[in-house]
Image (spheres, rainbow, N blue to C red):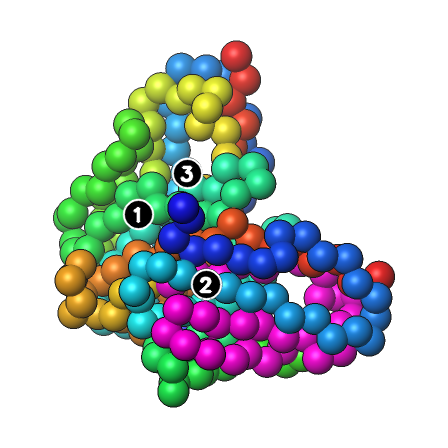
Amino acid sequence: GDSVTQMEGPVTLSEEAFLTINCTYTATGYPSLFWYVQYPGEGLQLLLKATKADDKGSNKGFEATYRKETTSFHLEKGSVQVSDSAVYFCALHTGNQFYFGTGTSLTVIP
Amino acid sequence: DADVTQTPRNRITKTGKRIMLECSQTKGHDRMYWYRQDPGLGLRLIYYSFDVKDINKGEISDGYSVSRQAQAKFSLSLESAIPNQTALYFCATSDSPGGQRGPYNEQFFGPGTRLTVL
């Protein structure tokens, strides 16, 4: 069945470090791919998305490219800030259901 | 005002009690979902509804029931709460495929309800 596997955390980085959070998926058809972010005490909110192969989603300095050949959608940011500390979820949408990864907790220290 | 609201935000109850969690949305979306979040397990789908007359079980529906009272309201009930239902519960909405935002539409989440069953 459809599923998402993402890098386990927690991840701790110093401010201005480079971030990569890996995400791979299994899906039939042509899913859309998403990254959601959850700040402490809040619900999930959309960070970025890509709807077809080779699309690049970007927002707030974060980027992810939909790679069909490697079934991946890795999240990257060139220089993290303390305010990026949150839990990040990779997700896919097949048209009827959404499937989420287990989440990766990121802590950025000054 | 928030587009997706959940009440209550926190609830502590005892084993065997009946609990209802409520969700309302002002986004005009047809689709609504209930998830629970547990540490290390991510989000797991409990129930989802594609319109008022269409309700479907998700991955972990046992011990839960739902009611879609209107397009904007979707309630989750625990008929007889047990301690392993202690979790963070989220309601979410999304537009239908082919709606105004296109075929693949993201979900919008409420702020969550933290439920503790003693």
**Name of the residue lying farthest toward the bottom:** B53
| Residue at the (29%, 43%) spot, across then down | A48
Q: Say what secondary structure mark 3 lies in.
A: strand
- Look at the picture and state if B38 lies above or below A13: below
Asked if residue A9 shows in the view, the reply is: no
Chain to which the residue tagged by mark 2 belongs: B
- The reply to whether label 2 and label 3 mark residues of one chain is no
Is the Cβ of the residue at disc 2 closer than 8 Å to that at disc 3? no
The image quarter containing residue A76 is top left
Is A12 in front, or is A48? A48
Is A49 in front, or is B3? B3
- The reply to whether label 1 and label 2 mark residues of one chain is no
Q: Please name the residue that numbered disc 3 is placed on.
A: A21
CA separation in Å, label 1 and label 2: 32 Å
Residue B62 place in picture, x, y as percent? 63, 80
- Is A11 covered by the magenta stretch? no
Q: Which residues are magenta?
A: B64-93
| Residue at the (38%, 53%) spot, across then down | B3
Mark 2 or 3: the one toward you: 2
Residue A35 place in picture, x, y as percent? 36, 46
Chain to which the residue tagged by mark 3 belongs: A
- The first of marks 3 and 1 along the sequence is 3
Q: Please name the residue that numbered disc 1 is placed on.
A: A73
